[in-house]
Amino acid sequence: EVQLVESGGGLVQPGQSLRLSCAASAVSFSDFYIDWVRQAPGKGLEWVGRTRNKAKSHTTAYAASVKGRFTISRDDSKNSVNLQMNSLRTEDTAVYYCTIPYATWGDSWGQGTLVTVSS
Amino acid sequence: QSVLTQPPSASGTPGQRVTISCSGSSSNIGSRDVYWYQQVPGTAPKLLIQRNNQRPSGVPDRFSGSKSGTSASLAISGLRSEDDTYYYCAVWDDSLSGRVFGGGTKLTVL
């Protein structure tokens, strides 16, 4: 069974940076797209960004709300993906999930990590 | 305001069949595959329907998906109390070059 585990969440002040990590087991990362999806307290799901697989040259895509502030990187040799979040705003407060969409078995999600941006 | 429109709420009684709609446009539902998720508050979303109408292994056949033009629907038959939770549609949007989620529908089993 594929397992994804996010880490790195916490409390930061507006304008600061935070780096989230997502580690996978039981799967070869290089074959898959990895998405980050967030959910603000009491709100719906919001797609944050994507790193595509090796076949797609690991290209990335971002939601307009985070473009230029967030960066996704991956290390397939370590089966890990990072989400570097800079210039954080209060509206970035959310639970952040990493997910493997479009897998042959369906998809996989981590348990989520909470990011709180507050002064 | 999401580019995918879902009704904020839906309801039904045990055993009934309910449908949840997801309305989009030619740049998303009209040209891409739709996915449906179920989410119990405090937990990660669970994939119910992939590629418009395919159920991943383990998803009961009470759940079904369909798509027509720029709209999609999730149908739940034989409604059960454990279906009382939130449902989201999702699709890639070519105009936005990003994935979009519907605003979510809270299903209440009366």
Image: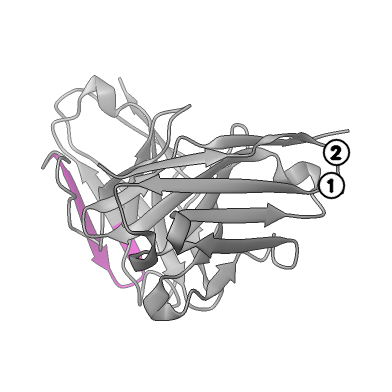
Residue drawn at (31%, 68%) of the image: B33
- Give the residue at x 32% y 62%: B34
Q: Name the residue located 32 percent from the left edge and 56 percent from the top edge.
A: B35
Decide: few, some or many residues near mark 1? Use Cα within 10 Å; few <14, some 14-19, many ≥20. few
| Image quadrant occupied by the C terminus of chain A | top right
Above or below B3: residue B84: above
Q: Is the magenta stretch mostly helix, strand or loop?
A: strand
Q: Is residue B70 magenta?
A: yes
For residue A8, which numbered disc appears in the image? Answer: none
Magenta-drawn segment: B62-72
Indicate the amino acid at tag 2. Gln
What is the x, y in percent for residue B57? Answer: 14, 46
Q: In the visual, does B16 lie left or right of B21? A: left
**Cβ–Cβ below 8 Å for labels 1 and 2?**
yes
Q: What element carries label 1?
A: loop
Residue depicted at 19% across the width and 29% down the height = B79
Horizontal side of residue B83 vs A18, given as left or right? left
Chain letter of the residue carrying label 2:
A
| Residue in front for this viewpoint, A71 or B18 | A71
Residue A16, numbered label:
1
Q: In which quarter of the image is residue B16?
A: top left
Above or below B88: residue A54: below
**Mark 1 residue type:** Gln
Q: Does the magenta stretch include residue B65?
A: yes
- Residue B24 appearing in the image: no
Q: Where is residue B21 in the image (x, y as percent from the top left)?
A: 34, 52
